[in-house]
Structures are given as C-alpha cells and as structure tokens.
Image (tube, rainbow, N blue to C red):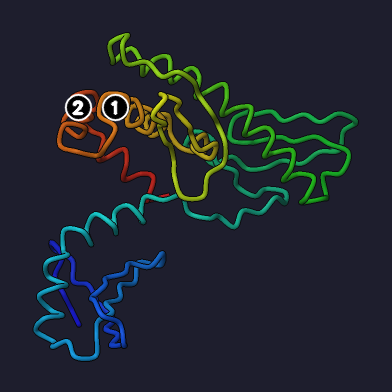
Amino acid sequence: MKFNVGATELNVALHRSGRKSLALIVHPDLSIECRFPLVCSMNTVEEFINSKTHWMQKTLRKIEARPQQTNRTFQEASLQPFLGVEYALKLMTGARVKVQLSDLELTLSCRKPDSPVTVSRILRNWYREQAKRVFKTRLIDCQKLFSGNHSCSGLVIRRMKSRWGSCSSTGVITLNSRLVEYPMGVIDYVIVHELCHLVHFSHNKQFYRLLAEKMPDWRERRAVLSGY
C-alpha cells in the first residue's frame, strides 16, 4: 500500500497474521511493514498507518543518520577519508611504523605494507589517536557556547555501530571515532548536539530550540552524515 509522508511516497508491505494488535515496523534497509490481525479491515489498517506518519518520518531520519558500514580497501592508492578530505594511500616498506599526511596523500610505512590486515590495524590505531586529538580540541571550543554550569564531565571515544554520539545522565559524552573522517563542522555539530543534552536530556522542543540557538545550520551539518 502506498502512503504519502510529507513530500515522499512510501510503500508499506502488509502482513496479515494471527496477532492481536497492529504494528508498524521500519527495517534497517528503510523498508516498512505493517502487521495486523486476521479480522482487521483494510480501512482500519489504512487509518492506523496514516496516524503513524509523523513517527515514520522521525524513524526514517534516525535510521538514515546512523553510521553506514564502509567496505574500505587498504591497497596502494585506495582512498582514506580524514576530516572531510579523501587521501590516496601510499604504502612504503620501513623498519618503523609511521603514518603521515602530505598534500593529498596518506603515507604509511611498516614492515609488511603488502598485508591489508597489517595496514588496516595500523590505520585504525592512527585514526583513533587523531580522533582523541581533534575531539578534545573541538570539545573545548564548543563548550564555550555554553555556560560553565553545562560542561561535560568526561569524554569517551570509541567505534559505535548505530550512533555518532551519546550523552549519559552523568554528563559523560561518547563520540564515535569514525567522526574524524568527516569535516570539522560535522564533528562540531555532533559535539554541540550532545552538549545540548546536558541542558535538555530528551529530544523535546526545548532541546531543538537550544540546538538552533547554538548552531543555526545544524540541519545542514547533520545532512552531511547521511550523505557520506
């Protein structure tokens, strides 16, 4: 069944079963399914789905904004993103491990440059160290937008599958290490987003009002996350 959600037409797969209630499911691949009882009329199903259009919009946006899995390769000349710029990987044989940026090249020296596993491990460690350096600096600058009463109590950096960032009830902000691949403005957006949670913990109207006050173009910055 086709439904209009805003300016977008969506297909909703209908599944009749022995269940007792109606349920609407948005799958990770953005497909939508409605499950309903055997005795349920199509009018009831259509009314139910129409009543969930706002929820569908919100859920689809949330899934689209999740980190996407990348099939990155680690051979010579493969592209490696860093702060919004793609660098061609240059592999060299060397007695010591060394990673260096120059112009549009990311040069990596190690004993086994022909081993994708070795190169992948070295690059992951390098990205993690760069993330620590960049995120700490950006957090200090972004916190200047807020009063001293709303500073975070700690910063954690790790790889996350379904989030770019999070904020705990104790004020600890966690950032996805993969953010260091994105432009600085996008990193700032995620940090400011989490800092706003120190004032308003849930995504209510007050939260978005504060986010727009601190970062008027936050929607454009957020769009970059789903565009990569």
Along the line of sight, the residue nearer the viewer: 156 or 217: 156
Marks 2 and 1 close (CB-CB < 8 Å): yes
Q: Which amino acid type is marked by label 2?
A: Leu
Circle 1: element type: helix
Q: Is residue 125 left or right of residue 24?
A: right
Q: Position of residue 209 (x, y in %)?
A: 16, 31
What residue did someone put label 2 on? 210
Up/down of 70 relative to 131, above or below: below
Q: Where is residue 37 drawn, in percent x and y?
A: 24, 85
In the picture as drawn, the residue positioned furthest to the top comes out as: 148
**Picture quadrant where residue 158 is located:** top right
| Other residues around mark 1 within 10 Å, as few (<14) / some (14–19) / many (≥20) | many
Q: State which quarter of the image contains the N terminus.
A: bottom left
Q: Amino acid at mark 1?
A: Cys
**Would residue 121 be found to the left or right of residue 62 on screen?**
right
- Residue, x 67% and y 42% (percent of image)? 89
Q: Is residue 21 above or below residue 7?
A: below
Instruction: Report the disc number at residue 130.
Output: none
Label 2 residue SS: helix
Q: Position of residue 154 (x, y in %)?
A: 49, 20
Label 1 belongs to which residue?
A: 196
Q: Residue at x 21, y 59 (%)?
A: 55
